Image (cartoon, grey):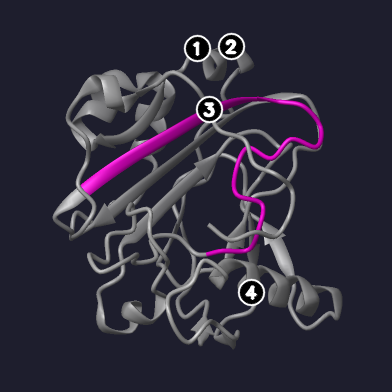
Amino acid sequence: MNFNRGNLVYGNKIKQPSQDLIRNTLGLHNASLEDALKYGGDLTRAAIGAMSLTMSKKYIVVDTKIHMLIPGMCPAIPGWHTDGVPRGNSLDPTAKQDPNIHAQEEMDSPIFHLLVTGESCLTKFVKERNFELEVPEKPSTKLYQMVSHQVNERVNKGELTTFEAPSCVPVMWDWWEVHTGVPAKSHEWRFLIRVTESDIQKPKTDLRDIIRVQQQGYMPMEFGW
């Protein structure tokens, strides 16, 4: 299957926020654009304002995460993967079912916008465009284990090259773009925001579900989910 079919598009750079501002920013889970602007705080509003939202899909969903990093901690998925893969019979990317990446060939891709602050833990991408990777013939949780293993193998051989997303700059891509979280290199408060424009995924409406009261960490290894 072919990956990195499009090109990354960069938005406007925002000012590097203070550690206090990041620490006091609310986390959001599947918030609507309206609720994100209302409850997300100054940093969230600045990040959204720097993005080139297309307004071309039915729904806009906003997620923000705030982590107090220590060296070696992974605040984002550390294996090479893509975002928004259809899952199960419903093809809903939020379903807790096997990923069906083959369904993407017949569907319109969501649009993803990402911004990460700081320097310690920036999302990593693959520079090369239109490269092939083997994927399972049928929906399987082994999909991203396979993808991550192949990308790491080809990076180690020098066949693929990687780079970090620029700090405080929004990056836009589609669901064919391979990327990975990385372990933190130093102590730092980190803010991440992802805005998803989609025809499938609806934002949540209950503030008890939207306001994050905890953050998730990840193990630094290849895995399936």
Q: CA distance from mark 1 to mark 4?
A: 38 Å
Q: Amino acid at mark 4?
A: Met
On the image, numbered disc 2 is attached to which residue?
20
On the image, numbered disc 3 is attached to which residue?
215
Q: CA distance from mark 2 to mark 4?
A: 40 Å
- Nearest the viewer among 79 and 127 is 79
Q: CA distance from mark 3 to mark 4?
A: 27 Å
Q: Position of residue 94 (x, y in %)?
A: 33, 52
Few, some or many residues within 10 Å of mark 1 (<14, 14–19, 20+)? few
Compared to residue 53, the image places residue 191 above or below, namely above
Which secondary structure, mark 4?
Answer: helix
CB under 8 Å between callouts 3 and 1?
A: no
Number of labels in the image equals 4
CB under 8 Å between callouts 2 and 1?
A: yes
Marking on residue 146: 4
On the image, numbered disc 1 is attached to which residue?
24
